[in-house]
Amino acid sequence: MRRDTVNFKIGDTHKFEIDGTKILLDVNSGSVHVIDDLMWNFHEKMLDRQGNFEEALRDCAAEYDARSLAALKEEVLDLIAQGLLFSSDENVSQYALPENPVLKSLCLNISHDCNLRCAYCFASSGPFGGERLLMPEEIGKKAIDYLMAHSGSRKHCEIDFFGGEPLMNWHAIKEVVAYGREQGKKYGKEIKFTLTTNGVALNDEVQDFLNRENISVVLSLDGRPEVHDRVRKFPSGKGSYEIINAHLKRFIQSRDCQNYYVRGTFTGFNKDFCQDAIHLVEQGYDIISLEPVVTSEEEAYGLKDSDLPHLYEEYIKLARYYRKRKKEGKPFTFFHFNLDLRHGPCLPKRLTGCGAGHEYMVVTPEGDFYPCHQFVGRKEYKLGSLDSGGLNEPLRKKFQQAHIYHKPCCVACWARFYCSGGCHANADAFNKDIYQPYALGCALQKMRLECAIWLQALDALE
């Protein structure tokens, strides 16, 4: 059979259109093609004909002239020969699970308490469904020892301070950082520290320490004052926007590096979240993220499947604004539009995502291990403890094996190499199965990816 008459596998392509720009993504190679109407229609015919090249061309003959079809045929076959279109997935044969996974990072839930009472908090405003506790510094130091002992030959490791609100345990943070620096030198490793804070306690002392120690910081602010204050309140019921916004501005102005970003959450109360992104940018925050709330549709602030068309339009509005600011010489970074189309992350990262449960774990104030901070309190997912030293290896192996080739919904999904199978915790929360992704989350991820690809395609055309 001649090369130009074979059937091609076209399932691993995805096409979409935004503002008149038609784009075709070759999933396996990561190649992005800006296409015309002829190629768009030819691709439709290829789908109808289950990849039969010649039959798809004949189906186009009624609408297009022979010269155009001949040029299309030559161009498509050339792209196929280069592995840039209708390519095969070679990752299946290349990827093998390491027998002994190496620990890369630990999240320290250094505070199971919080000075806010946010309506949508997955941690029940701090205690994760348990008691309000602060991690003793001895537990934090044991966690550092554990990371040093189980990170193998890795030179670079990470410690994330999380909660609740980590700054409610300020003394322990300082002690753990000092101990981590000491142990890093001892073992020839570098520990990168990150802290996530709502900003309420971000005073001068904290600010100076975080800057001096070069600690990356995630700062929480949801957007417009009325949006933020509706869900992010103090225990008294008062909104927190005014205080937090002032603290965050002062902190960012004090930094001489950009290892921070401002993270917001949008809910069913602010489905026009593009306006919140614009507000954050106009406040001077140029590295931002807005994440969709994850909760039941029954909650007043929850997101529903019926919201998806509107939310897609909001992402497109945000992408237009992003592009406008960039052309004006006033760019900002939006986390979900910062996409490496060259498959920059290593293969395991693209297939397994965050590495929760095998490369990454969380430590609770009591010293217990869970796969990540969102699993804390789900007793069936307790992996072990610092005191016992051992881990539930079958459970750890289950998380290690939860990559895209073991998830039925992901195997043929066009977004699989960018989302890496989605969040295990959300999958468990909605489907009681870490191998069954959270569907609404998948839909939103695909929207963000299309916008990110569109932006980069337009940049490449200019």
Image: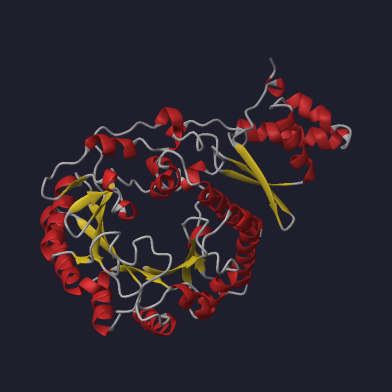
Counting every numbered tag in the picture gives 0
Q: Is residue 220 left or right of residue 362?
A: right
Q: Please tell me whether residue 275 is drawn above or below residue 18 in the rendered image.
A: below
The residue drawn where x is 49% and y is 43% is 417
Q: Is residue 23 left or right of residue 256?
A: right
Quadrant hosting residue 210: bottom left
The N terminus lies in quadrant? top right
Q: Is residue 343 visible?
A: no
User: Residue 100: x, y in percent?
Assistant: 23, 35
The residue drawn where x is 16% and y is 48% is 385
User: Residue 146: x, y in percent?
Assistant: 15, 51
Nearest to the observer: residue 387 or residue 218:
387
Q: Is residue 206 left or right of residue 175?
A: right
Q: Is residue 100 visible?
A: yes
The colour scheme of the drawn protein is: secondary structure
Quadrant hosting residue 97: top left
User: Residue 194: x, y in percent?
Assistant: 29, 64
The C terminus lies in quadrant? bottom right
Q: Please tell me whether residue 268 is drawn above or below residue 75 in the rendered image.
A: below
Q: Residue furthest front?
A: 298
Q: Please tell me whether residue 326 is drawn above or below residue 411 in the rendered image.
A: below
User: Residue 383: x, y in percent?
Assistant: 23, 44
